[in-house]
Image (cartoon, rainbow, N blue to C red):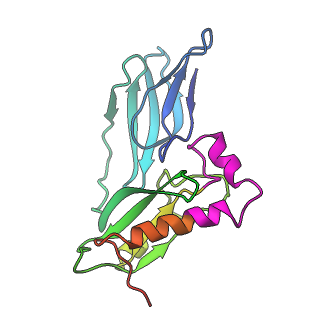
């Protein structure tokens, strides 16, 4: 059986042996969706995206996990910046991850104003491209964008969700603020305070 599940800022494909319950992760990066198994059972086809990739159609070998990107009739334009995985530690010692997208030219000498973009749901994760919630529009206008995955976010375990459950104004809020503080303290992405 093949499933997709959120895991640490991605949504990989997992192979599950139904007889033994053994789980094997097949893919590394990106968020996979629309997974289809070939008639011979040797290949999975999937749409794979991430916040730095609007989407590719990929073929994945079900035995080795080898992935190849299938040809596309068009190429996407270059993105107007770069993306980094960021994290900090909350007051209770919990890891708080997220993504930071920086516009071209951002440096210690030229920091960008920071926009904090919090996902709704509240159960969810910033792990796949969205045309609707596209932070690259702000990045193209010179804004740095922080996409935090605070408690209640999926892909970090049940304890991470439970930590924020019914505490909407506590841990989810303090996680977001802790990550924002950590990003603002970095010299290359320090926000211009206004």
Answer above or below: position of 37 versus 188. above
Q: Position of residue 191 (x, y in %)?
A: 39, 79
Specify the farthest residue to the right.
166
Q: Write the residue at 66% across / 40% down.
A: 158
Q: Which of the two residues, 28 or 170, is positioned nearer the viewer here? A: 170
- Give residue 83's position: percent from left, percent from top: 34, 59
Which picture quadrant has residue 173? bottom right
Instruction: Give the quadrant of residue 22.
Output: top right
Residue 32 relative to residue 83: left or right = right
Give the vertical position of 95 relative to 157 (above or below): below
Residue 118 drawn in magenta? no
Q: Residue furthest top?
A: 19
Q: Quadrant of the C terminus?
A: bottom left
- Image quarter (top left, top right, bottom left or bottom right) of the N terminus: top right
Q: Which residues are magenta?
A: 151-175
Asked if residue 185 can be seen in this view, the reply is: yes
- The residue lying toward the viewer, choosing from 162 and 31, is 162
Place of residue 107 in the rendered image (x, y in percent of width and height, measured from the top left): 24, 73
Horizontal arrangement in the rendering, residue 172 relative to residue 178 (left or right): right
Relative to 96, residue 158 above or below:
above
Q: Residue furthest front?
A: 92
Q: Residue at x 50, y 58 (%)?
A: 130
Look at the image and say whether residue 155 sits in the magenta stretch. yes
**Residue 122 vs residue 71, the one in the foreground:** 122
Asked whether, in this view, residue 93 is left or right of residue 73, the answer is right
Q: Quadrant of residue 192?
A: bottom left
* Residue 94, percent from left and from top: 55, 51
């Amino acid at each position: 059986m093949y499933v997709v599940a959120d895991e640490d800022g991605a949504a990989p494909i997992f192979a599950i042996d139904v007889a033994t319950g053994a789980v094997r992760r097949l893919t590394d990066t990106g968020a996979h969706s629309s997974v289809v198994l070939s008639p011979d059972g040797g290949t999975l086809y999937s749409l794979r995206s991430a916040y730095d990739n609007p989407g590719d159609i990929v073929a994945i070998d079900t035995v080795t996990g080898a992935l190849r990107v299938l040809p596309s009739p068009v190429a996407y334009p270059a993105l107007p910046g770069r993306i980094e995985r960021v994290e900090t530690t909350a007051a209770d010692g919990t890891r708080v991850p997220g993504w930071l997208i920086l516009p071209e030219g951002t440096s210690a000498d030229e920091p960008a104003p920071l926009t904090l973009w919090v996902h709704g749901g509240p159960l969810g994760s910033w792990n796949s491209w969205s045309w609707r919630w596209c932070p690259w529009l702000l990045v193209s206008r010179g804004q740095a964008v922080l996409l935090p995955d605070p408690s209640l976010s999926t892909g970090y375990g049940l304890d991470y969700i439970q930590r924020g459950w019914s505490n909407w104004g506590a841990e989810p809020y303090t996680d977001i603020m802790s990550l924002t503080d950590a990003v603002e303290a970095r010299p290359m992405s320090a926000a211009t305070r206004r």
